[in-house]
Image (cartoon, rainbow, N blue to C red):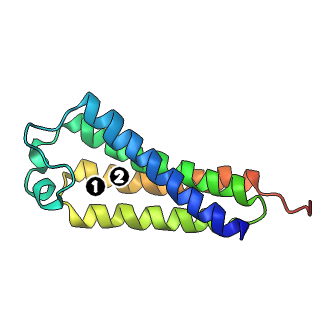
Amino acid sequence: MKNVLATIVGLIAASVTVYIFETLIGHNLFPLPEGAQAMDMEWIKNNMDKIPVGSKVFVVIGHFAGIVVGMLVAALISKKSMIPSYIVGVFMLAATVFNIIMLPKELWFTLSDGILTIAGFFIGKTLAQKRITTKNV
């Protein structure tokens, strides 16, 4: 039961982290154009060129940080298994791949998002493994 909780809380932590970087920080420092519909995928698809570069950078940072934080939180709760961290990591990798496929982006954005998310997975894995104990408590 603890691993289920670790997975759920890890996914929530990852999602909140992405939201903080992407929306709260990125959109406030680099506002979307007037009339933008940030929750409408069609609008985003058709107007990627109007979204400020700084906002896109914070999306990449958010995806990286989200996977690291989510995997770490899952490990901190589980304490005995890497499985919750792996589930969080794979889910966040899949979400990033989905994002890359669904939205047309500049090459730099696609490459940096993909590469940093993969790097985030391995950093998250390393940090999570340091929190896992094999001793019976």
Q: Label 2 near label 1: C-beta < 8 Å?
A: yes
Assign the C terminus to one quadrant of the image: bottom right
| Quarter of the image where one finds residue 8 | bottom right
Residue 133 left/right relative to 13: right
Q: Where is residue 51 in the image (x, y as percent from the top left)?
A: 15, 42
Q: Position of residue 72 (x, y in %)?
A: 63, 51
> Residue at 86% of width from left, 63% of height from top?
134
Q: Position of residue 9 (x, y in %)?
A: 58, 57
> Residue at 72% of width from left, 66% of height from top?
2
Query: What secondary structure is found at the residue carrying circle 1?
Result: helix
Q: How many labels does the image show?
A: 2
Name the foreground residue: 23 vs 65: 23
Per the rendering, the mark at residue 110 is 1
| Quarter of the image where one finds residue 5 | bottom right
- Residue 80 seen: yes
Which class describes the residues within 10 Å of circle 2: few (<14), some (14-19), or many (20+)? many
> Residue at 52% of width from left, 59% of height from top?
11
> Residue at 65% of width from left, 61% of height from top?
6
Name the foreground residue: 20 vs 104: 20
Query: What secondary structure is found at the residue carrying circle 2?
Result: helix
Assign the N terminus to one quadrant of the image: bottom right
> Gap between marks 1 and 2, in whole Å?
5 Å
Q: Mark 2 points at which residue?
A: 113
Hey, what amino acid is under mark 2?
Answer: Asp
- Residue 119 seen: no
